[in-house]
Image (cartoon, rainbow, N blue to C red):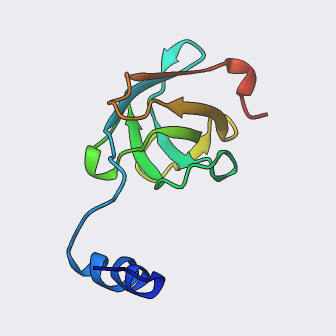
Amino acid sequence: MTFNIRSVCFFFVLVLPLTGCNFATQTYSVTGTVNYDGQPLAQGMITLTPDGVSGNSGKSSMAEIRNGSFSVPKKYGVTGGAYRIFVESVESLGGEDAGSKELFPTFSMDYHFPEGANPPPLTIDIPKTSKKK
């Protein structure tokens, strides 16, 4: 049996996707802690964004930070490779209707998650010098 380029392309472009093969990249859960000025961050949001400049085309993930801890389940987790991590926080001004203010401007850092394995817990220490004025 001989194969020509047209039949090979037909197989990969039309037939293979119909088979239900899943070539999706493995995702991993991520847990960790966030400290601000040496103390657990009371509340905030962490965003993990693949660094496309470094060739990572994974998916972004977000998680709420409560009492210094966060957890991203495997379903929404990270792939291996370079990521940009963003941390945002607010401080309650008291009472239900009092509102909130930012503790610091959005903190960002680069991080490289290991490929092919669950990452170790992530610890992020945000210095007080990041305080919003």
Instruction: Provide residue 58's location: percent of width, then percent of height.
Output: 48, 53
Q: Residue at x 41, y 36 (%)?
A: 65
Q: Residue at x 27, y 44 (%)?
A: 74
Check the image and name the residue furthest to the front: 1
Q: Residue at x 35, y 46 (%)?
A: 77
Q: Can the viewer see residue 86 in this picture?
A: no
Residue 14: name its quadrant.
Answer: bottom left
Look at the picture and state if 26 lies above or below 107. Answer: below
Instruction: Provide residue 92's location: percent of width, then percent of height.
Output: 50, 39
Quarter of the image for the C terminus: give it: top right
Look at the picture and state if 96 lies above or below 3. Answer: above
Quarter of the image for the N terminus: give it: bottom left
Q: Can the viewer see residue 125 in this picture?
A: yes
Determine whether, in the image, residue 91 is placed left or right of residue 73.
right
Name the foreground residue: 133 vs 45.
45
Determine whether, in the image, residue 3 is placed left or right of residue 130.
left
Instruction: Provide residue 96's location: percent of width, then percent of height.
Output: 40, 49
